[in-house]
């Protein structure tokens, strides 16, 4: 499984929901591909890669959460899917932490034992009882034993979580949910992505045309107004579209100067 890469070409003419279902399905496939290693607690490398796959799936689910919850899909099931993947990721993360920690501690024990050797000239330790920090070695080995026990416990929890998801056919339900999302996306072809701090949402063609119409009528979304499709700022000292300085505005070749800042001349008339 190591080094496996999946490439997904986004269909730009498809809706956000359709592409979301395909991307999430790909990430789910990557996670399920590690199913043969669930029953192997010694599969250190594969369990680590499985953790990475779970992390990618979780982040992908969270990115599209707002968009998918906005369609007719089951919000409750989608939320449960995210929580289940979080649980798997946490359990696999604890397993990986233990797999990294124990070898490092054992290496430290070996280094402490080797410190009693006679300058590397002999494999025999120098005579005496204080050349090696025996207490430190015992302490490190105790931590190793405790970590191993905790790792075994977390692995048992992980295996039980996976079996529960299989027994309750959660993976099948997730597949069905993605199919419903793709179907809903098929009805929303004319759309584009809107990316913000809240995630990725979808803007349909009608919504986009309405926004353009509002801006042309003078209602830009950030509180500015427009004249002939150009944005300008309101308020004292504000600059308008085409202005060359405070209190003046040039449109269609007409120049006007206002007595106060903020005045402008539009098409030769004074406001």
Image (tube, grey):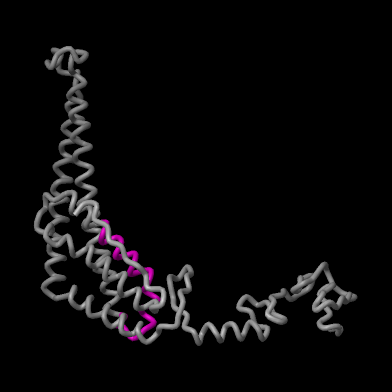
Q: Which residues are magenta?
A: 52-75
Q: Please provide percent x and percent y for residue 69.
A: 36, 80
In the rendered image, residue 231 lying in the magenta stretch gets the answer no
Whole-percent x, y for residue 191 in the image: 45, 80
User: Which residue lies at the image location 20% right of the left edge and 78% below the top edge?
Assistant: 173
Left or right side of 253 for 14: left
In this view, 110 is above or below 82? above
Residue visible at 16% across and 38% down?
A: 142
Q: Is residue 223 left or right of residue 209?
A: right
- Residue 49 left/right relative to 187: left
- Quadrant hosting residue 53: bottom left
Of residues 240 and 115, the one nearer the viewer is 240
Residue 48: x and y in percent read 22, 52
Quadrant, the C terminus:
bottom right
Q: Tell me which secondary structure the magenta stretch mostly adopts.
A: helix
The verdict on residue 53 being magenta is: yes
Q: Residue at x 21, y 26 (%)?
A: 112
Q: Residue at x 18, y 65 (%)?
A: 32
Viewer-side residue, 130 vs 27: 27
In the rendered picture of this protein, how many numbered marks are placed on residues? 0
The single residue placed furthest to the left in the displayed view is 39
Of the pair 83 and 202, the residue shown nearer to us: 202
Find residue 117 and report its horizontal and vertical position in percent: 18, 17
């Amino acid at each position: 499984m190591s080094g496996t890469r999946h490439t997904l070409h986004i269909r730009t003419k498809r809706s956000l929901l359709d592409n979301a279902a395909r991307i999430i399905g790909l990430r789910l496939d990557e996670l399920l591909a590690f199913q043969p290693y669930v029953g192997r607690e010694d599969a250190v490398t594969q369990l680590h890669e499985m953790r990475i796959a779970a992390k990618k799936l979780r982040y992908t689910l969270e990115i599209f959460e707002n968009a998918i919850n906005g369609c007719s899909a089951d919000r409750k099931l989608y939320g449960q899917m995210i929580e289940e993947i979080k649980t798997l990721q946490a359990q696999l993360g604890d397993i990986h932490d233990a797999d990294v920690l124990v070898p490092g501690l054992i290496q430290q024990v070996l280094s402490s034992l080797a410190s009693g050797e006679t300058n590397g000239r002999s494999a025999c330790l120098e005579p005496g009882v204080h050349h090696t920090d025996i207490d430190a070695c015992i302490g490190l080995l105790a931590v190793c034993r405790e970590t191993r026990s905790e790792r075994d416990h977390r692995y048992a929890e992980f295996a039980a979580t996976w079996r529960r998801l299989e027994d309750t056919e959660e993976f099948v339900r997730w597949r069905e949910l993605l199919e419903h999302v793709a179907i809903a996306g098929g009805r929303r072809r004319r759309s584009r992505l809107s990316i913000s701090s809240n995630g990725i949402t979808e803007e349909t063609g009608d919504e986009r045309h309405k926004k353009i119409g509002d801006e042309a009528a003078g209602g830009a979304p950030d509180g500015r107004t427009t004249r002939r499709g150009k944005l300008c700022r309101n308020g004292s000292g504000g600059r308008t579209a085409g202005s060359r300085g405070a209190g003046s505005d040039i449109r269609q070749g007409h120049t006007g100067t206002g007595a106060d800042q903020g005045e402008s001349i539009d098409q030769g008339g004074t406001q």
